[in-house]
Image (cartoon, grey):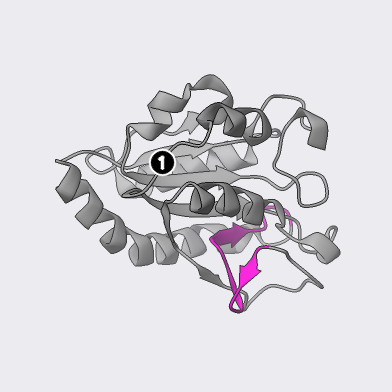
Amino acid sequence: MSKIGIFFGTDTGSTRLVAKKIFSLLGEELADKPKNINRVKPEELLQYDALILGTPSYGIGDLPGLAAGCQERSWQEFVPSLDGADLSGKRIALFGLGHQERYASRFASSLIQLYRVFYDYGAEMIGRWSTEGYTFEHSDSIIDNQFVGLVLDQRGQPHLTDERIRIWLAQITPQLLPVLAEAA
């Protein structure tokens, strides 16, 4: 059976930490070690049929990257290298970080940008997450009253992170496993 690919963009290291937690909970039997998107080539990501992708929020709903204020290259620089790839048959779950108090008017809004890129390339997007338990004014990352992926607030609610990850993985893993079996 092939494995789940975990890729993330980060600037302060928080998204990397969450990616490592996800990997630890899934285990090396199901997932490969997480990789920073600024250190991979498109074919490394495209080899996976089941993916978990993570992003911090930067700018005003921008994909994280140098133009959005990140210190390092991130999703903003990686996405053009996909150059219209056909991702049909791939199943992708997203997680994103944000600070609901400081950025209440645009909480975790970078997540929708990542969602749109991979959705537009034909991937099946899974892993929506409830907005309950958060306090914010607005987020672009909501479709049908749910976040398009797991949203974590490492600054305002770090005590909820581990439990949210466990619940979310219990939700998405059964949806990712059939894709792995088909790819094997």
Kindly indicate the quadrant of the structure image that contains residue 161.
Answer: bottom right
Relative to residue 168, is residue 117 depicted above or below? above
The magenta stretch is 141-155
Residue sitting at x 48%, y 64%: 163
Q: Is residue 116 left or right of residue 181?
A: right
Relative to residue 30, is residue 140 depicted above or below? below
Relative to residue 143, is residue 4 depicted above or below? above
Residue 150 counted in the magenta span: yes
Kindly indicate the quadrant of the structure image that contains residue 158.
Answer: bottom right
Residue 4, given in percent of the width and then of the height, sits at: 32, 42
Relative to residue 7, is residue 42 depicted above or below? above
Q: Nearer the viewer, residue 76 or 6?
A: 76
Q: Is residue 34 left or right of residue 141?
A: left
Specify whether residue 156 is in view. Answer: yes
Specify whether residue 33 is in view. Answer: no
At label 1, the amino acid type is: Asp
Residue sitting at x 50%, y 57%: 162
Residue 29, given in percent of the width and then of the height, sits at: 22, 40
Residue 113, given in percent of the width and then of the height, sits at: 65, 51
**What residue did someone put label 1 on?**
86
Count of numbered marks = 1
Quadrant including the N terminus: top left
Residue sitting at x 53%, y 31%: 83
Residue sitting at x 75%, y 74%: 135
**Callout 1: few (<14), some (14-19), or many (20+) C-alpha neighbours within 10 Å?**
some
